[in-house]
Amino acid sequence: MASSLDFNRIIQRSIAVSQLVQRTYREIAVDPRATGEAAIVVVAVAIASGIGGAANGFGGIVAGVISAFISWLLFAAVAWFFGTQLFGTPTTHGSRDGLIRTLGYAKAPALLNLLGFIPLIGWIFGTVAWVWVIITSLFAIRQVLGLSTGRAIITAIVAAIASGIIIGLVGIIFGIGFVLVGGM
């Protein structure tokens, strides 16, 4: 798999997703190679966020990467379920794997979190990244599932709440909730 990864393609796709290029979302959704690429984007974002919040140290970065993967996959699965089973229409389409891939890439704007360590203004980069990721994620849900913007927003809100509840329950059961919530 490592030999088939094209980092230039990952960078170009990340930029295009951040710019809301519809063709790129569709391309990623149907490209099985994009799953590994999306995972690399998620890891890069988690590491950038860890560096940006340097106070957490190396352990915080490792916990951040693990929680980023868990929250990415959980949110994508829950959004796919709600988007296809509850909020979909007869024209709703798209695969679970396609949504996983595009939602992984949708995290690309959060690379701005790398600049979170800058005194006094670092929080601005984090806020911009957070809003931008919400927009790219909504766009991914809308594009991949063929939902209207309103249905995509409802799907994302319900999926975020359901994912948060699941992570909270896992955290209560295993005593790791605060680690997992950090990746949301």
Image (tube, rainbow, N blue to C red):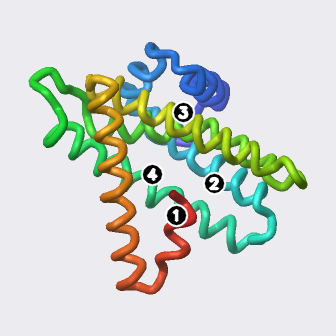
Q: Residues within 10 Å of mark 2 (few under 14, many from 20)?
A: many
Mark number displayed over residue 72:
4
Residue 12's spot in the image, x, y percent?
Answer: 63, 22
Residue 19's spot in the image, x, y percent?
Answer: 59, 20
Judge from the rendering whether residue 67 lies leftward or rightward of residue 172; answer left or right. Answer: right
The three-letter amino acid code for the residue at tag 2 is: Ala
Mark number displayed over residue 4:
3
Mark nearer the viewer, 3 or 2: 2
The three-letter amino acid code for the residue at tag 1 is: Ser
> Marks 2 and 4: in contact by CB < 8 Å?
no
The numbered mark, 1 or 2, whose residue comes first in the sequence reads 2
- Which residue lies under the disc numbered 1? 67
The three-letter amino acid code for the residue at tag 3 is: Ser
> Marks 3 and 4: in contact by CB < 8 Å?
no
- Quarter of the rendering containing residue 143: top left
SS at mark 3 in the image: helix
Q: Residue at x 54, y 64 (%)?
A: 66
- Which residue lies under the disc numbered 2? 46
> Marks 2 and 1: in contact by CB < 8 Å?
yes
Q: Residues within 10 Å of mark 3 (few under 14, many from 20)?
A: few
